[in-house]
Amino acid sequence: MMAEISHVDLTTVPPDIWHELSSYLDTGDFVSLAAVNQSLRRTLTSNTQLLSFLLRHRMNIEWPSSSKRTPYEEIVFHIPNRRCSGCGGLERIPSWDAFLKRKLCADCRDGPRFRMIVSTKAKSEYKLDENDLSPLKATILANPHYRGGPPMRLYSVVDVMKASKAKMAAKGTTLEEERRKTQARREALKRGRLAAMEKRRIALIDALAAVGLELDDHCRSISRFIEQTGRPKLTLEQTVQHAVHGHDFECQIPTEDDEWY
């Protein structure tokens, strides 16, 4: 059987208990609690010592004892400029976020609730595709890298994480497992590329030796062939021909007579 829920009349709680409880609250939570009803507000705002502490040490606001406003009125006076629309706190000065169009403190701006992620990163990091992203709310911005490029789409990290979790559950796997598989594929491709480079290197050493030349690791043409970079890609025959005739001035390979081209 479920235990019966007991109801407590807030007006019967002794003031010293309220004063003790409220001392553990953030200033924003203190103001919210004081707004419950007039009786509770009178009880809480009677603790001038706590309110002065909140003003001076939590909100870093100088409150002279000669002020016409009470400490609580001084706190309320600063709410429009100090209230974070994310957490409702008053102790960290919020700044206007032009992208989200709201005032946020540093903690909220850096927290996952308001963190945004571009579509390409959402796909790669959370294993989503266009079908997964289409139901999510997107914010469209002009491409910051290419003026004529496609617009940039941003999504809430929280929404993306939920979509990813649902997709992984439907597939009977986890995001960590999918990332592990992706990493394993990348490492296998890397090993394959390194093996192919070593194979081309050995073939080039043999081909150069056949014409009396040695491999120069600082030669750009040789690096292009071994790593298969640049356009157009060089063949083994082309690379050897460059070495023999010295057409590529950046590739200086000594011949049998120590002549440099």
Image (cartoon, helix red, strand yellow):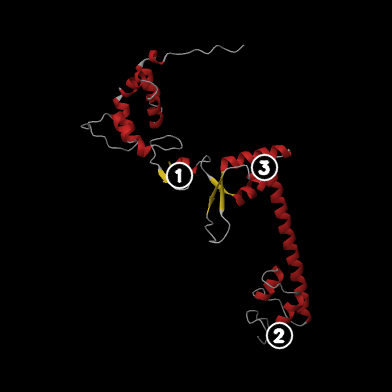
Q: Quadrant for residue 226, please give it.
A: bottom right
Up-down: is 115 above or below 51?
below
Residue situated in front as seen by the camera: 146 or 188: 146
Estimate the spatial distance between the alpha carbons at disc 3 and disc 2, rounded to whole Å.
55 Å
Q: Of the two numbered discs 3 and 2 on the same chain, state the one appearing first in sequence.
A: 3
Disc number placed over residue 245 in the picture, else none: 2
Residue 190 place in picture, x, y as percent: 71, 58
Left or right of 83 on screen, residue 235: right
Q: Amino acid at mark 2?
A: His
Q: Residues within 10 Å of mark 1 (few under 14, many from 20)?
A: few
Marks 1 and 3: in contact by CB < 8 Å?
no
Q: Of the two numbered discs 3 and 1 on the same chain, state the one appearing first in sequence.
A: 1
Return the residue at label 3.
Answer: 175
Q: Write the residue at 75% across / 69% down.
A: 200
For marks 3 and 2, give the one nearer the viewer.
Answer: 3
- Quadrant location of the C terminus in the rendered image: bottom right
- Quadrant location of the N terminus in the rendered image: top right
Residue 210 place in picture, x, y as percent: 79, 80
For marks 1 and 2, give the one nearer the viewer.
Answer: 1
Left or right of 87 on screen, residue 202: right
Q: Residues within 10 Å of mark 2 (few under 14, many from 20)?
A: few
Estimate the spatial distance between the alpha carbons at disc 1 and disc 2, rounded to whole Å.
65 Å
Return the residue at label 1.
Answer: 101
For marks 3 and 1, give the one nearer the viewer.
Answer: 1
Q: Amino acid at mark 3?
A: Leu
Q: Quadrant for residue 145, please give it.
A: bottom right
Q: Secondary structure at mark 2?
A: helix
Q: Secondary structure at mark 3?
A: helix
